[in-house]
Amino acid sequence: MATAAETRAGDKAGRGPGRVGQPSRWKRNLVLVLVLVLAGGLAWAWQGLREEALVGGSYGAQVGCVCRFVSARPLASCEADLAAAQMKGAARLVSLSEATGRRSITASVPLLASQSADFDPRRGCRVQPWQD
């Protein structure tokens, strides 16, 4: 029958300094808790970020459409106008693209929202309704 001291010594025998093992359980649990907290925070803030992105996308599509088709400026110049607007939150990530055949500008925020504005010579630029 082994004594308590021998059992403890035997447990430590397999964990020498040269042996590479798994990270300790508390480190793994700490990382898991941090990931869960970050995921929960993102889930909590997602709706607000999406709404900011929709508003920023709508603004960007309207400004881009007017800049490109009414003022006849290049799209790069229109993107500079958006940068000068100093939008906050997710709206500051707006990028513009043009569909020349349709005379349409699409403003998008990656992974969150996309919004288009179409140009009609009689009515001007019209932002498309939001899609939920």
Image (cartoon, rainbow, N blue to C red):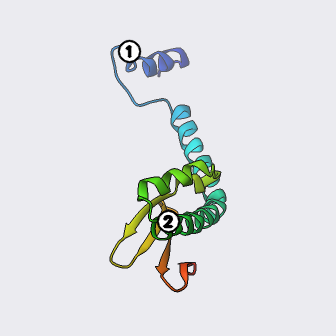
Task: Determine crowd level at label 1: few under 14, some 14-19, many 20+ residues with C-alpha closer than 10 A.
Answer: few
Residue 94, numbered circle: none
Image: 32 above or below 68 = above
Location of residue 130 (image quadrant): bottom right
Image: 26 above or below 15 = below
In the rendered image, which residue does mark 2 sit on?
71
Image: 32 above or below 130 = above
* Residue in the image at 42% along x and 59% along y: 75
Image: 71 above or below 31 = below
Q: Amino acid at mark 2?
A: Ser
Instruction: Pick the residue in front: 115 or 83.
Output: 83
Tag 2 and tag 1, C-beta contact below 8 Å: no
Q: Is residue 77 left or right of residue 54?
A: left
Local SS, label 2: loop
Q: Quadrant of the C terminus?
A: bottom right
* Residue in the image at 60% along x and 62% along y: 56
In three-dimensional space, the C-alpha distance between marks 2 and 1, rounded to whole angstroms, equals 74 Å
Location of residue 29 (image quadrant): top right
Local SS, label 1: loop
Place of residue 47 in the rendered image (x, y in percent of width and height, measured from the top left): 64, 64
Mark closer to the observer (2, 1): 2
In the rendered image, which residue does mark 1 sit on?
16
Instruction: Pick the residue in front: 98 or 11.
Output: 98
Place of residue 81 in the rendered image (x, y in percent of width and height, measured from the top left): 55, 53
Instruction: Pick the residue in front: 39 or 19.
Output: 39
Dot placed on the residue nearer the N-terminal end, 2 or 1: 1
* Residue in the image at 51% along x and 37% along y: 28
